[in-house]
Image (tube, coloured by chain):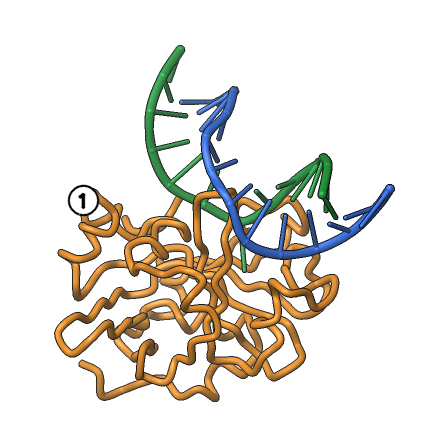
Chain colours: A orange, B green, C blue
Amino acid sequence: MFENIVPIDFFKQETEIVAKKLIGKLFVRFIDEKQVLAAEIIETEAYLPINDPACHASFKKTKRNVPMFENGGILYIYFIYGNHYCANIVTEKEGQGAAVLIRAAKPVLGIELMKINRGIEQLEMLCKGPGNFAKAFGLDKTHNFKTLDGFNFGIYDYKNYKNEEIVQTTRVGIKKAVDLPLRYYLKDSKFISKK
DNA sequence: TATACGATGCACT
DNA sequence: GTGCATCGTATAG
């Protein structure tokens, strides 16, 4: 299952393209020799380097958003609302300030550990929403900056969906630039965070 | 140093 | 459908 890793160069493309193409790919965390967590990415949002006030990197480089200015292919994990972590994949080239937020996924491997991490049983609830996705994978700020090179983390080819199976719409939970259609999700999936 | 607030989730009505 | 916990970060003073 892990022979087709997505190369780091993939993440250096335009953020919208990466966000859309990530749908159907496998997000994998290798904890140790025995423990592997994997989920099919079902829902993403793009945060752009220019003309996107909702992007954390839109104003300037700060202590929090430095990972977004690195070369694409690393994780950007931040803490929000006092309770939740959100996991992003940094995109574009060094100095741009862009990322793709992972909003929801379908658990594939390590489901038992995800249930423990979340404290619930329902499969479709395990990775529903960015905060829950991070919790199911046990992600926190210690995983900030981690590279998706297949050592600790990796993105792998998994499913290929047709263009018309991927819905493009407006983003969720933001106050700025609410009209930009930068959210992508798999049509009719029961794993998406919300309609 | 102080203070306001957010790319959320969940309990409660 | 509505309210709010909770805290790291940004920003101002």
User: Is A153 rendered above or below residue A181?
Assistant: below
In front: A80, or A13?
A80
Q: Secondary structure at mark 1?
A: loop
User: Is A141 rendered above or below residue A14?
Assistant: above
A49 left or right of B10? right
Which quarter of the rendering shows the C terminus of chain A? top left
Q: Number of callouts in the render?
A: 1
Which quarter of the rendering shows the N terminus of chain A? bottom left
Q: In x, y percent, where is residue A61?
A: 70, 68
In front: C1, or A138?
A138
Q: Amino acid at mark 1?
A: Gln
User: Is A106 rendered above or below residue A7?
Assistant: above
The disc numbered 1 marks a residue on which chain? A
The residue at the point 61 percent across, 71 percent down is A66
Regarding residue A60, the answer to whether it shows in the image is yes
Q: Quadrant of residue A26?
A: bottom left
A106 left or right of A76? left
Residue wearing tag 1: A122
Q: In x, y percent, where is residue A14?
A: 57, 77
Q: Quadrant of residue A182?
A: bottom right
The residue at the point 12 percent across, 74 percent down is A34
Regarding residue A195, the answer to whether it shows in the image is no
Assess disc 1: are there few (<14), some (14-19) or many (≥20) residues with their C-alpha within 10 Å of its C-alpha.
Answer: few
The residue at the point 46 percent across, 69 percent down is A144
Q: In x, y percent, where is residue A139?
A: 36, 61
Q: In x, y percent, where is residue A3?
A: 22, 88
